[in-house]
Amino acid sequence: MKIFITRLIPDKGINLLKEKGYEVVVSPHDRVLTKNELIDVLQKDRYDAVLCLLTDKIDAEVLSAAGPQCKIFANYAVGFDNIDLKAVAEKGVMASNTPGVLTDSVAEHTFALLLAIAHRVAEADRFTRAGKYMGWEPMLFLGESVSGKTLGIMGLGRIGSRVAYHAKRGFDMRVLYYDVKQNGEFEKEFQAEFRANPDDIFKEADFISIHVPLLDSTRHMVNKERIHMMKKTGFLVNTSRGPVIDELALVDALKNGVIAGAALDVFEHEPELASGLRELENVILTPHIASATEGARQAMSETAALNIIEALEGRTPPNLVKI
Ligand code: NAD
């Protein structure tokens, strides 16, 4: 069996595949392959499985290039918006993801962003490094406290509910959520309040954190209209996928004091940033690193490899994704 990995990843999964006796070929380029390069690689050799990243667009052409012997495209991510699932079903190939193993890392990063934007950490860091700190001042960098405030979660799945857990248990926040599915048990345990209309989250919350997957139904879910429903003192945090937010509308709102601030790990047109975003002081920007802890990335590597092994041994991968 021969496996192609589109970019070097932590070694746990690579070692598992090798221990199985599979031949593992890792792309020699430490960068995202262009679509043509990926097609070229898959046509030149015959691979039984491909371990791909969220930066690889897996569409009908790429799937065709892989040939009929290729059983599975195992994504090294929980999100799978980079994979055309309709084409996957049509080709009779499998696709998988890595849910769960990165939940803690992403929830922690979400909270790091939330606390950092509320306490103006990045802004104050820039100020201090610039040699502007002349001594304690009563009015210097007044921020917002998080404790006891209202957090609105959009998408109470694995990550959203872990963020809600930290909010409730760590900061005694009131938790509101919107999701296509209501979760009565979670509501009881964390005194969380469901809102059937997403607009209500935007109107009521002090902090809004986005955890929905990128789907047709969630693209620009955070649009100009909803941003304008937020409190003037409100903060928006996004560690899900960039296109869930209309980034230009957000920049405009941040510039004009419609909301207090935003902290973003993901961007609408990664790696490009919307014009004007990087100049704003009231934003925190991280380069899509919410899952980037040693433990989570090794576990993602292992999970992707286990999905491949299951598929190649004729069993259903534990994290099969379907339309
Ligand atoms: P999940 O499937 O457990 O949770 C997603 C939740 O969103 C579910 O509860 C689902 O019911 C809900 N949902 C789906 N469509 C909706 C809609 N239209 N309106 C409201 N709710 C909707 O997924 P997860 O493991 O919690 O991950 C969430 C997302 O986070 C992933 O899809 C991925 O895009 C993103 N993510 C980003 C990073 C990062 O590095 N920044 C890392 C991991 C995951």
Image (tube, rainbow, N blue to C red):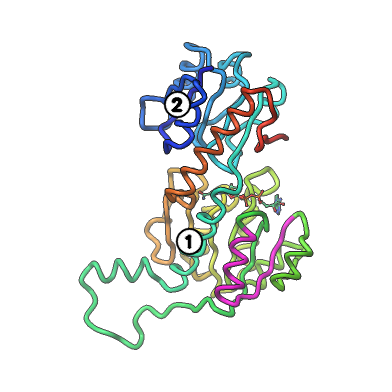
At a point 50% along the width and 71% down the height, the residue shown is 260
Counting other residues with Cα less than 10 Å from the Cα at mark 2, is it few (<14), some (14-19), or many (20 or more)?
few
Q: Tell me which residue sits at (37%, 78%) in the image.
A: 141
- Residue under numbered circle 1: 263
Q: Amino acid at mark 2?
A: Thr
Residue 97 lies, in percent from the top left, at 60, 38
Give residue 26's quadrant in the image. Answer: top left
Which residues make up the magenta segment? 160-179
Q: As rendered, which of 174 and 158 lies closer to the eye?
A: 158
Q: Look at mark 2 in the image and give the residue it sits on.
A: 34
Q: Position of residue 279 (x, y in %)?
A: 37, 59
User: Is label 2's Cβ within 8 Å of ligand 1?
Assistant: no
What is the magenta segment's predominant secondary structure? helix
Q: Secondary structure at mark 1?
A: strand
Q: CA distance from mark 2 to mark 1?
A: 29 Å
- Rendered-image quadrant of the C terminus: top right
| Residue drawn at 30 percent across, 86 percent down | 137
Q: Give the residue at x 69% y 30%.
A: 316
Amino acid at dot 1: Ala
Locate residue 24, reporting x and y percent. Answer: 45, 23
Secondary structure under the numbered disc 2 in the rendered image: loop
Q: Earlier in the sequence, mark 2 or mark 1?
A: 2
Magenta stretch contains residue 259: no
Vertical position of residue 155 compared to residue 207: above or below: above
